[in-house]
Amino acid sequence: MPNFAGNSVISKAKSMFSKRLLPADYEELLKFNSIPEIVAYLKKADKYTNTLDKVMDYSMHRGQLEDLIKKSYFNNVVKIVNFVSTKDRKFYELDMVKREIEIVLSSLRSIISGNIESSVRDLPLFFRKHASFNIEKLTKSLTFRDLLFALKNTRYFDIINPYYAEDPIDIRYTDIEQSMFLAYHNLVIERINKYFKGKIRTNLMDIYQTKVEVDNIIKIYRLKKFYNGSEEEIKKALITENIRMKKTDLESLIKLSDPNDVLMSISQSVYASYIDEDDYVYIEYQAEKIKYNIARRYMYFSTIPAIVYTVFIFLNEIEQNNIFNIIEGVRYDIEKSDIRKMLIY
């Protein structure tokens, strides 16, 4: 990427990262007991003021606020991608592919449940001008056949078509979801290998493969602890193609009979220096903390546009999830101390 464009990507990403919510902001947000109070506070934050400026605090409900936070997140991504005009732009567009997958899966869930209106309301419709398919057409799909028709000539048609079922009750949603994210995973690996080489490729692989490994460990733990999943069921739920972890090491984790041994494997792994010393109460917390600390390190020290952009995405997702956890905590009247344990910063 030419220096000007590359420097613009780095400058924009680091500038937006500097406007992130700080520990003091989270402490303030934890004091609130209603969505309007949260909205009023976020309006004052540089990062969200443009998105929330014109909304009425008192009339905002949880779903609307979450949609606006997603919109703010996506708009920030677009601002960075717009600086990229070189051949590696396809790498920078990977996050948009991920958003498309989420929209397709949301539409599929609505077909299964029959609750089409809810699906349309909750989808990020601001995405439509950037999508590779007609979002309105997709979200109005009443049947699996409608959905396939809306996805014709896109990368998703061939992934989903083998799972076609006439009756919504026969739709194998979990298998479709796994196939979609496996295809996304392979696409990420393909684009990293295609557009980068040397140390840049190595670092991008390190960042992304760490995420995949940690997510696999979470799935193994949860399927063992909460669902008593068999080894075969667990394998089907994991990303096992194009991964860094040795097949024998992954199988050893799957064979562990005690879920807590799976959890403990993180503290004894190469990721030990990236986790907190607190008790392992929430495995999701420890997993996100690993990703957060690695991403933050690269954000501060990297001068490579693709790397800064990648960790910017990770850090934005974590902040978004922090806000959603606070919103959910308010909605369900969860103890503030318990909400605080779920926040990553």
Image (cartoon, grey):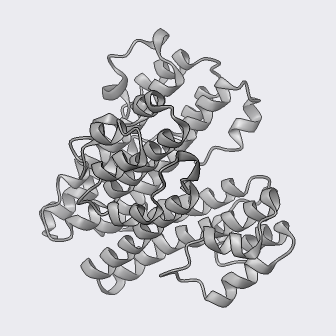
Residue 78's spot in the image, x, y percent? Answer: 25, 48
Name the residue at 41% across, 69% down. 183
- Residues 19 and 286: in front is 286
Q: Quick check: 56 above or below 67?
A: above
Name the residue at 75% across, 71% down. 267
Name the residue at 80% across, 53% down. 281
Residue 272 visible within the image = no
Q: Which quadrant of the figure contains the N terminus? A: bottom left
Q: Is residue 272 left or right of residue 51?
A: right
Residue 235's spot in the image, x, y percent? Answer: 65, 75
Q: Quick check: 138 above or below 64?
A: below
Q: How many marks?
A: 0
Q: Quick check: 141 above or below 258?
A: above
- Residues 59 and 172: in front is 172
Answer with the quarter of the image where residue 19 lies.
Answer: top left
- Residues 238 and 135: in front is 135
Residue 59 visible within the image = yes
